[in-house]
Image (tube, grey):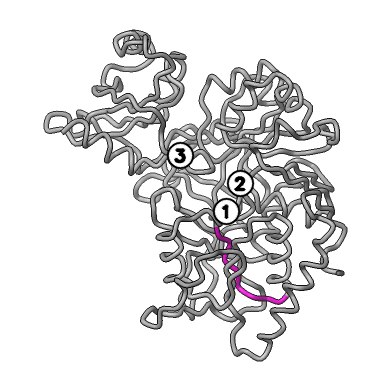
Amino acid sequence: MEFLGNFTLVCDRSDQLAQLTEQFYLELTLFSDWQTPPKIILAEREPVRFLAGLIAAVSAKCPIFLCNPNWAKQEWKQVFDLVQPDIIWGTSYKELVIDNNKTNYQLPITNYPHIMIPTGGSSGKIKFAVHTWETLTASVRGFTEYFQLEKVNSFCVLPLYHVSGLMQFMRCFITGGKLVISAFKELADYQLNQLEAAEFFISLVPTQLQNLLQNSDLTTWLSQFQTVLLGGAPAWDEILEKARYYQIPLALTYGMTETASQIAALKPDDFINGKVNSGQILPHAKVVICNDKGDILNTNQTGNITIQAESLALGYYPLAANQQPLAPTFSTDDIGFIDNKGYLNIVGRNSDKIITGGENVYPSEIESAIKATAMVSDVCVVGIPDQYWGQAVTAIYVPKNLDYSIAEIQNLLKDKLSKFKLPKHWIPVEKLPRNSQGKINRQQLQEIATYHIR
């Protein structure tokens, strides 16, 4: 099919991509006499079927909702109530779809298909950022220009329904590169010598990087990649130091679903030479730091991160029928600053900020300090309502060894953190709730902490 271009796919049944795309496309032609194009839910588990459905929907100019096939029944009900799809590819919960009492939103008719990408699932409320082929290709242009590439090859171990996996496909598809797809859990069994890693990008979240660094063969293999993009959640010092020791060409990234992946990235040479921040801004984007009043701040002043980008989503589904594309400005929930060399530094999330005894505390700083003690394998810091402090800094942690005492950890923190930043409560758990991208469900941990301390 001509719309597959020069793109090469390597995965199970990848030789059937053209045939499957044709089948999906022919199914959509049955709806050609509809006044508005059919809304499609795409939840195919097989990568080749997922990509075939996506390519067919975009070619037929049909709005498509990318979905996680592992969502629970209640999550699917939430999605079906919102979307009211006409076509469902991949999910087994089709009996939940029809509800005539729900509003059936229609997207505004445009010359380009809408691509809805899920976000916000870790908090229990699924939203869809509304993208177009144009916003996604703008992200690809910024990426290739920043990394000075004509063709992008990617080894993908992230889900295609998530922006982190989807954009790997987009970069390869647009530039005529090669996309190799493997389940992360099967990575150790992958024939590593089949891949010329030096010609490939790989994208990871911190927990995946941590797992790979525990295997010497995979660590050596990882060091051979052209670039290892790291994002999805904040990385902690321990794994960054280990990655630098083994000369892993890490590119720390900053971006989100709303911006169609990264709008800032630290190049591998900068990382190897000791920098630890989110790098410089990609060409398709502009970042300014603002105070609470919206005034633009100067270099090295900390404030709210505001993004202007050609890759910015139009908004969240449903868009109003008469809504025009938004001005390309997005005020994030992130706090940070831009240093003298134009590098973006992330301090934390505004909504995660803890105000204790009148002092502002950002959990990421405390979490990094606790992880640096090497006495915990995972940790999350939250603020719990407290009559005296306003909020009490509380650490929920997974101990590495039951022989370690809280007093030992606290003693190591005294020289690293101001007294008001030291956790007043410590709650040991077996595991922290994280989603597939490694992001912690802070709302759930807030409830756990409140229950333990009351």
Residue at x 75%, y 79% (from the top left corner): 26
Of discs 3 and 2, which sits in the foreground? 3
Quarter of the picture holding the C terminus: top left
SS of the residue at dot 2? strand
Instruction: Describe residue 353's horizontal placement relative to residue 216 as left or right.
Output: left
The answer to whether residue 131 of the structure is visible from this angle is no
Residue 65 within the magenta-colored segment of the rendering? yes
SS of the residue at dot 3? loop
Q: CA distance from mark 1 to mark 2?
A: 7 Å
**Residue in front for this viewpoint, 271 or 367:** 367
Quarter of the image for residue 134 reads: bottom right
Residue at x 45%, y 49% (from the top left corner): 332
What residue span does the magenta drawing correspond to? Answer: 60-67
Amino acid type at circle 1 is: Thr
Q: Which residue is mark 3?
A: 434
Q: Identify the mark at residue 259; answer none if there is no mark.
A: 1
Q: What percent of the width, then of the height, locates residue 135?
A: 64, 61
